[in-house]
Image (spheres, rainbow, N blue to C red):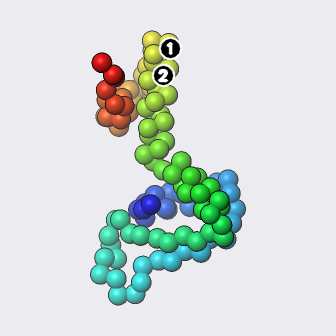
Amino acid sequence: MRFNEKELVFLSRQPSERAAELGMKGPKKGDAFLDEAERKYLFECSSREQCIEWMDAIIKASYEFMRKNLIFYRSEIQRLTGKDPLEQYGISDETRFQVSNVLPPPPP
C-alpha cells in the first residue's frame, strides 16, 4: 500500500492511538524522483498481526476513508430525517461532499 508525503505529514500530527517504535526507510541517495508525490516508504513490524493492525489504522486515518464515511453517514442521516446535515454549515453543495461521487448506483 502506498501513501503520499502529505498524508504521512498529516498523520504524524494526529494524536496517537497506538505507540511503537517505527523503523522507516526514506528514499535512497541518488533517487531521480525526489519530488515525486507518490513516494514509497517501507514500514517494519515485529509480527504479522501487528502489521495488519497498523495498516488498518493507517487506512482508517486516510482522507479518502474519512471522506467516504462522511458521505455514507450524510446520506443515511438524510434518508432517516429528510434533512441534509451539512446544510447548516453552508457546505452541502461542495463537490467533495456529493453522494454521487462515491456510492454505486442502486440495484434495479
**Residue 1 x/y as whole percent:** 44, 60
Task: Write down the quadrant of residue 51 in the picture.
Answer: bottom right
**Residue 6 x/y as whole percent:** 43, 60
Q: Where does the C terminus fall, quadrant-wise? A: top left
Please give the label number shown on residue 80: 1
Marks 2 & 1, CB-CB < 8 Å contact = yes
Q: Is residue 8 above or below residue 24?
A: above
Residue displayed at 56% across by 52% down:
56
Given the current orientation, which residue lies at the most extreme right position?
19
Residue displayed at 58% across by 52% down:
57
Foreground residue, 54 or 77? 54
Given the current orientation, which residue lies at the most extreme top position?
82
- CA distance for labels 2 and 1: 6 Å
Determine whether, in the image, residue 108 is placed left or right of residue 51: left
**Residue 37 x/y as whole percent:** 34, 65
Say which residue label 2 marks.
76
Task: Write down the quadrant of residue 58 in the picture.
Answer: bottom right
Neighbor class of circle 2 (other Cα within 10 Å; few <14, some 14-19, many 20+) is some
Identify the amino acid type marked 1. Answer: Leu
Inspect this view and state whether residue 94 appears: no
Identify the amino acid type marked 2. Answer: Glu
Q: Secondary structure at mark 2?
A: helix
Q: Secondary structure at mark 1?
A: helix
Foreground residue, 84 or 19? 19
Residue displayed at 32% across by 70% down:
36
**Residue 28 x/y as whole percent:** 42, 84
Given the current orientation, which residue lies at the most extreme bottom position?
30
Q: Is residue 106 above or below residue 28?
A: above
Count of numbered badges drawn on the protein: 2
Inspect this view and state whether residue 45 appears: yes
Neighbor class of circle 1 (other Cα within 10 Å; few <14, some 14-19, many 20+) is few
